[in-house]
Amino acid sequence: MVEEPVIRWLEAIAPVIAVYGNRDSDQLKLSLPEKKILELEGFRIGILHGHGDKGTTLDRLPDFFRDEALDCIIFGHSHIPFNKRIGSTLYFNPGSPTVKKRQRYPSVGIIILDEDIKSEIEFLTGV
């Protein structure tokens, strides 16, 4: 669960773009959107947590952005790293640096916007 002070703490380090997740506080859910679309360096990027009632997180993602042409969808929920193009869209879940569900190591993700979107998952093996 994330609370508002965590967002403020992160903002002191770097700009924060956040959406709410299923385990966040009611107060945080009121202050953050469910999903967000960013236009960065000529790319359209959708961000959402990805929780829902039916199917897998990956199965639910297209429904959240049904009418949007996106170059990338960044999601979480499962805490399981995922980095794959499906059609022309990159689906990217960085995993989690703290809650590594069914993963050997915690992880973080890196996305570089250049002529194309480059992405990688870094596993924190020393943690």
Image (tube, grey):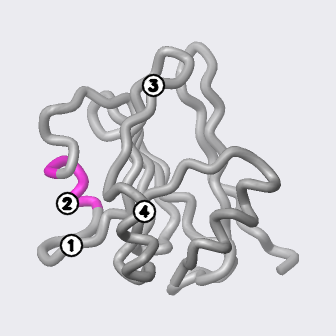
Q: Viewed as shown, does residue 54 lie left or right of 52?
A: left
Give the SS element for disc 2.
helix
Give the SS element for disc 3.
strand
Kind of residue sitting beneath label 4 = Ser
Kind of residue sitting beneath label 3 = Glu
Rounded to the nearest angstrom, the CA distance separating label 4 from label 2 is 23 Å
Q: Earlier in the sequence, mark 4 or mark 2?
A: 4
Predominant SS of the magenta segment: helix
Q: Which residue is mark 1?
A: 52
Rounded to the nearest angstrom, the CA distance separating label 1 from label 3 is 25 Å
Read off the magenta span.
Answer: 58-63
Q: Which residue is mark 2?
A: 60
Give the SS element for disc 4.
helix
Q: Establish if 79 lies above or below 120.
A: below
Q: Earlier in the sequence, mark 2 or mark 3?
A: 3
Q: Residue 25: image x %, image y %?
A: 43, 82
| Numbered tag placed on residue 4 in the rendering | none
Q: Which residue is mark 4?
A: 31
Q: Earlier in the sequence, mark 1 or mark 2?
A: 1
Q: What residue is at 56 percent from the left and 59 percent from the top?
A: 94
Q: What residue is at 28 percent from the left and 60 percent from the top?
A: 58
Kind of residue sitting beneath label 2 = Arg
